[in-house]
Amino acid sequence: MATNTTTTSSSSFMGFSFCLHRHLLLLLLLSSLLARPGAALDWVRFNVPRWAARGGEAVLTCQFDLADDLLYSVKWYKSGREFYRFVPAEKPPQTHFPFPGVTVDTEQSDEQQVALKGVNLDTAGRYKCEVLTEAPLFKTLVRSALLTVYELPDGNPEVIGGQHQYRPGETVNLTCQAPRSIPATTLTWYINDQQAPQDYLVEYKVPPDAEGRVASRLGLQFKAREWHFPEGRLTFRCAAVLHRLYKKDALHEGVVAPPDPLSLGHDASGSGEVEKQLMVLLMTGATCLLHFTLT
């Protein structure tokens, strides 16, 4: 009885070993097939423009290397919703779906790019490309990126307010304003080529117009001190920047005002005025004494 049990256990173990060995061989074979050069589905180039001009066009690129696989489909999504697909087995292979702000130019689109025309504010968002190969492996590539719509300012920034002359102790009050754009430009104040401290700045919120354009406005207020006037001048620069697409400066300059003629010879304690009055008294006394002597 014990002999039969031992024989049965030995046969089961040998069967399990054979099955495990066969599966390991299959796994190694599959791994070697997937690892051989040029056999893997891979990206060649993926690009979603970081910026697209309002009213213009945008080309989204999804280039890939199929290696030894066959393409089943390429699908494009915006904000998680499909708007374009390319399926070689279908006739026609292109299909696009209505989506606010997304107008596909089918003549310029294929399996490795999709062209959008008539870019507007609704075109902005996150775009995703999904590549899928045929059975049996159904390999997949997925990548996404953000697209931002812009409209450049129609003009240059300008400085509002300011004086030609400033005295130490006076309050400087300037405002920099840039024309409307999408998105709003970023304004930065510089005093004598040094960025202005945060507590000098006055933030203004400007609501967008009916087309979504926003004007930028930033104030500059501080009390001028003597050290603000190197070489007797006080210079201001307002830089307006919209990413790398737009960069303009607005300049303003003032000089230190000359001393008030009425204050010449006076110091902070008023001793000059006392000396002046004392001199007048002495001269008046001398005149009276001379008149008394002559009479």
Image (cartoon, rainbow, N blue to C red):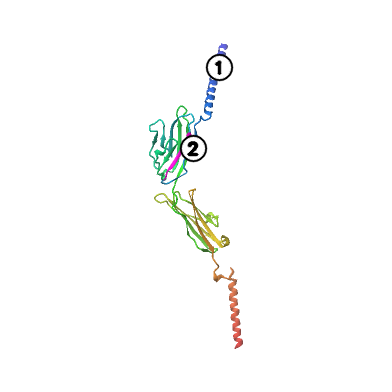
- The quarter of the picture where residue 3 lies is top right
User: Magenta span has 62?
Assistant: yes
Q: Nearer the viewer, mark 1 or mark 2?
A: 2
**In the rendered image, is residue 263 in sight?**
yes
Q: Residue at x 60, y 87 (%)?
A: 294
Residue 85 drawn at (x, y percent):
41, 35
Mark 1 touches mark 2? (CB < 8 Å): no
Residue 134 drawn at (x, y percent):
45, 29
Which residue in the protein does label 2 denote? 45
User: Magenta span has 43?
Assistant: no
* Numbered range of the magenta stretch: 56-64
* Prevailing secondary structure of the magenta residues: strand
Image-based side of 242 in relation to 3, left or right: left
**Which quadrant holds the N terminus?**
top right
Identity, as a three-letter code, of the amino acid under mark 1:
Met
Which residue in the protein does label 1 denote? 14
Residue 266 drawn at (x, y percent):
58, 70
**In the rendered image, is residue 80 in sight?**
no
Work out which residue is located at the far front of the displayed protein and give it.
107
Residue 277 drawn at (x, y percent):
58, 76
Task: Choose between 49 and 277: the one closer to the eye.
Answer: 49
